[in-house]
Amino acid sequence: MNARISIIALVAAAVLLPGRVCASETAAPETGPAEIAAATGRATREEPDKCDQEPAQDKLPEKTRAGTFEFACRTLRWVDGLFGSSHDFREESVDGRLSLGFAWNQYEHWDPSLRFRVHTDLPNLSSRWNAFFGRVDEEDYIEGSETTQESALRRGISDSDETEWLLGLGYKGREEKTGGWDYSVGVRLRSPPRFYVRTRYEKVASLSPNLDLRYRQTFFWRDGSSGFGTTTHLDSDRQIDPDNILRWEFIAKLTEATEGIHWWLGNTWYHRLGEKRGVSLRSFARGATDAEVELLEYGLELTWRRQVAREWLFINAGPTLTWPRERREERREASLGFQVLMEMEFGYSEG
């Protein structure tokens, strides 16, 4: 009797257990995170958005910096999303600068300044593609005629204040040390939109341990403005000692819209006063071979630069003395001035 019961039990186990295993295997794929969370009584936790940076302090500078980064990060992440979602957008690669200031001189009077620019990689497009978004001097940025040192008084060859919001895509074909070509296309973000195309060749040569020479040639096309054109940019840095650097810079530009060459020449001495402050003295001249007056302006800029309470906040201020003349009937006279520029760096790389 006991033997019969044992045999019946074994047969029942052989018939019933495989069915239960198969049923559980069929049901398993239908069990997702929501069902598991409901069964265990625990809710799933969402990861924080890396575009949202919590201000380190509840103060205006920190709030402004966090808000600026969030605006730039979300905008560029949206651009990256236009090319798919195969790769995660690297919020850590977003870095930029916001500058606010003004300049005043006897010749031009007040000139307010608001500049914003940010760059990032675009992993869903290519490892070599990147995006630019900012409010800049449209002509100087597109045509490659910006000076190396930004100031509230003069930012490039152009003397116009045509500041625009631009969005651009860039392809980096060159290497940092050997140089080469890079390419970019973009659009002005207002109605009517205005497009541009730019390609640039850059070469850096180390002439000695303390002397570097950089050469950059830019070819561009601007819709409805300068047309086709090219800009040559040469500059060199010579380190005299750990606290003193001399920089020489030359820019020359030729476009379809102008018959001659617009040029800018400058020489700057940088002196470090400490870890957080320094001073620079720049002498410059600019002109155009097709203008009424070929030598449009020359002068001096003395700039004091200091880190303000935070590692990412700087102030630049100082007097200017220039001799402008744009029309033949004008008399060239000295023009005293003053400039103030606040700069804020933002992004993960800037801490």
Image (cartoon, rainbow, N blue to C red):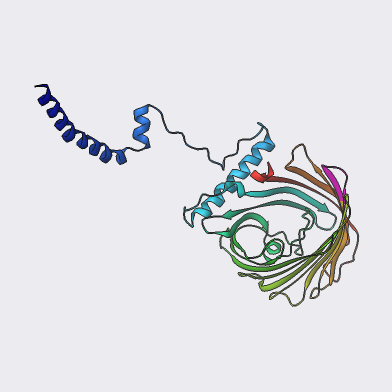
Whole-percent x, y for residue 163 in the image: 67, 57
Query: In front: 101, or 6?
Result: 6
Q: Residue at (73%, 51%) from the top-left corner?
A: 113
- Identify the residue at the far left of this view: 1
Q: Total number of numbered labels?
A: 0
- Identify the residue at the far top of this view: 2
Q: Main secondary structure of the magenta part?
A: strand
Can residue 209 be found in the magenta stretch? no
Whole-percent x, y for residue 161 in the image: 72, 59
Q: Residue at (27%, 39%) from the top-left corner?
A: 25
| On screen, residue 93 above or below 192 | above
Q: Quadrant of residue 183?
A: bottom right
| On screen, residue 121 above or below 200 | above
Visible in this render: residue 68?
yes
Visible in this render: residue 319?
no
Whole-percent x, y for residue 196 in the image: 61, 67
Q: Which corner quadrant holds the C terminus?
A: top right
- Position of residue 162 in the picture relative to residue 44 (left or right): right
Q: Residue at (13%, 29%) from the top-left corner?
A: 7
The region drawn magenta spans 270-279
Q: Quadrant of residue 282?
A: bottom right
